[in-house]
Image: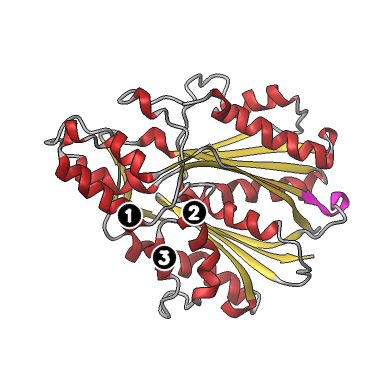
């Protein structure tokens, strides 16, 4: 049975100037002018134009949502209601959500249940909640949604979000030992959400859709992306360590299985871990993509930064909503992150 991505949606919260965030995290009166200047230079080098951010900067060092509309339950409600309008509530039988970081504090019942209650979904299976699988978690949700659609001939909703600003490390003073260890992650990660409507052939809409040809999930233990005493840190060698593993484990095997070359893949939605990480996929020893093939992923990194789990789906969403005939063209979603968990999805426009 054919399974399709029938619709996509993204949620981008208010955009904040990176320099405003630097001054909030590293005020001169607390950390000194040298640290403040270092952070501003790093933010400039990272190259993010505006960061989607839900953190109330005025409340620091307490970390809380600036506006209740950005609570993940309300994000999930908006995405589900959008897809309900497209396919009908009675045709949605499965809901999978994945994330790593959230401002949600009322843990029981879990987030997935609270969203189901809010939207009135009548599911065939318990809603699925997949936290802490790194930036690849959305592909895990897609895998389970595809399996459900094949077995039940009904639609599934995938909701992927992260609120990385909740992890921001706020230094106590200029002598704080974690200032330099956490500065990169403080200036790299943003907030946002994405949703996908997965449907079987009997619910396929009339418009162009993405047929899911195959997907692959793999894992290799690594701690280059980790927490330490509540501080979020990125290792200096992640860009050299992770892309080769991802290419070898979840990209090349699918290309080989379907006798595709990398040139056959027109649309690449690669996780926006950072410019250096995306650029690594141009290395001939890793994958050998062209600048044009990675340009869309780099565009969204420059635009918003690293949104963690939903990052690659922002790029996918931009491809989905292009108004042109794409029948027969192929694309690939590539996600990877802490763990290291990784996954890819091969699709063809139909």
Residue marked by disc 3: 243
Quadrant in which residue 321 is drawn: bottom right
Q: Distance between the residues labelled 3 and 1?
A: 24 Å
Tell me the residue at 78%/49% (across/down).
Answer: 199
Horizontally, residue 313 falls left or right of residue 125, namely: left
| Magenta-drawn stretch contains 203 | yes
Read off the magenta span: 199-204
> What SS does tag 1 mark?
helix
State the residue in front, 73 or 100.
73
Task: Tell me if mark 3 has few (under 14), some (14-19) or many (20+) residues whose alpha carbon lies within 10 angstroms of its own.
Answer: many
Query: Furthest-left residue in view?
Result: 175
Q: Earlier in the sequence, mark 2 or mark 3?
A: 3
Residue 208 placed where, x, y %? Answer: 80, 60
At x 58% / y 52%, what residue is drawn? 314
Q: Which label sits in the foreground, 2 or 3? A: 2
Q: Position of residue 332 (x, y in %)?
A: 61, 65
Q: Name the residue under label 1.
A: 44
- The residue that mark 2 highlights is 303
């Amino acid at each position: 049975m054919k399974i399709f991505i029938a619709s996509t949606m993204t949620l981008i919260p208010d955009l904040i100037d990176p320099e405003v965030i630097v001054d909030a995290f590293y005020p001169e009166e607390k950390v000194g002018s040298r640290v403040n200047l270092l952070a501003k230079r790093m933010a400039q080098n990272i190259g993010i134009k505006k960061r989607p951010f839900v953190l109330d900067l005025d409340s620091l060092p307490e970390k809380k949502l600036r506006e209740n509309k950005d609570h993940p339950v309300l994000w999930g409600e908006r995405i589900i209601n959008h897809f309900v309008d497209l396919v009908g509530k009675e045709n949605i039988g499965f809901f999978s959500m994945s994330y790593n970081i959230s401002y949600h504090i009322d843990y029981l019942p879990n987030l997935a249940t609270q969203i189901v209650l809010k939207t009135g979904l009548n599911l065939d299976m318990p809603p699925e909640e997949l936290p802490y699988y790194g930036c690849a978690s959305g592909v895990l949700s897609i895998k389970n949604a595809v399996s459900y659609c094949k077995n039940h001939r009904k639609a599934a909703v995938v909701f992927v979000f992260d609120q990385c600003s909740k992890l921001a490390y706020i230094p106590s003073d200029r002598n704080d030992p974690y200032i330099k260890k956490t500065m990169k992650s403080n200036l790299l990660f943003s907030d946002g959400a994405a949703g996908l409507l997965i449907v079987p052939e009997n619910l396929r809409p009339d418009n162009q859709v993405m047929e899911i040809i195959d997907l692959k999930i793999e894992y290799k233990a690594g701690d280059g992306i980790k927490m330490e005493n509540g501080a979020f840190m990125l290792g200096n060698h992640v860009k050299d360590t992770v892309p080769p593993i991802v290419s070898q484990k979840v990209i090349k095997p699918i290309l080989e299985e379907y006798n595709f070359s990398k040139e056959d893949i027109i649309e690449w939605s690669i996780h926006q871990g950072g410019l250096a990480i995306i650029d690594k996929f141009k290395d001939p020893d890793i994958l050998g993509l062209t600048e044009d093939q990675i340009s869309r992923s780099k565009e969204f990194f420059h635009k918003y930064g690293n949104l963690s789990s939903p990052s690659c789906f922002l790029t996918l969403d931009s491809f989905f909503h292009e108004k042109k005939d794409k029948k027969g063209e192929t694309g690939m979603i590539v996600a990877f992150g802490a763990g290291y968990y990784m996954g890819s999805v091969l699709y063809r426009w139909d």
